[in-house]
Image (spheres, rainbow, N blue to C red):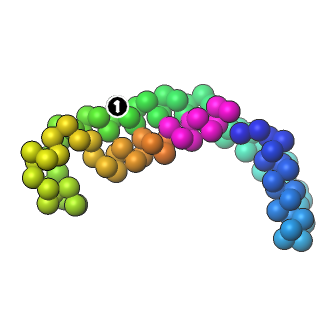
Amino acid sequence: VDQRDADARQRELQRVAHAAPAGRLAPCQRACRRRCVLLLRQLGGPAAAAAEDGAEKTKIMEAHAGRSSYVPIEVLRDVPDPGAKAAACWLSAIAKAAAE
């Protein structure tokens, strides 16, 4: 995420909404945003990899609740838990966006 793009989007939103900048909190907001992006760049990839690994490990688990519990185990064999897979996909997308 390019800081200039984020700042430009914020200025445009303020212009369209006729809103004043955050005032004294604006520098804090910018610093927090930069820090979050830096953390995501550092930790996003490993977090996404760990989530994907965890999702893969659910293939051997038997569902006891939720929609998957109604499906015969033979059908779900070698299929990761959909929620775990979705979380891994979200983390991967966040990590990729932060890396750009």
Question: Which residue sits at x=57%, y=41%?
Answer: 94
37 magenta-colored? no
Q: Position of residue 52 (x, y in %)?
A: 38, 34
Q: Residue at x 34, y 45 (%)?
A: 84
Disc 1 residue type (three-letter): Asp
Is residue 7 left or right of 58 when viewed as pictured? right
Instruction: Find the magenta span and give its range.
Output: 92-100
**Viewer-side residue, 64 vs 22:** 64
x, y (%) of residue 18? 89, 71
- The x and y percentages for residue 87 are 42, 46
Q: Is residue 1 visible?
A: yes
Task: Look at the image and tell me whether residue 22 can be seen.
Answer: no
Q: Which residue is mark 1?
A: 53
Outermost residue to the bottom: 18
Mark 1: give few (<14), some (14-19) or many (20+) Cα within 10 Å. some
The kind of secondary structure element at disc 1 is: helix
**Where is residue 100, by image quadrant?**
top right
Give the residue at x 27% y 41%.
80
Question: How many marks overall?
Answer: 1
Prevailing SS of the magenta stretch? helix
**From the viewer's perspective, is residue 100 above or below residue 79?**
above
16 on left or right of 88: right
79 vs 51, nearest the viewer: 79
Q: Residue at x 14, y 60 (%)?
A: 70
Q: Quadrant of the N terminus?
A: top right
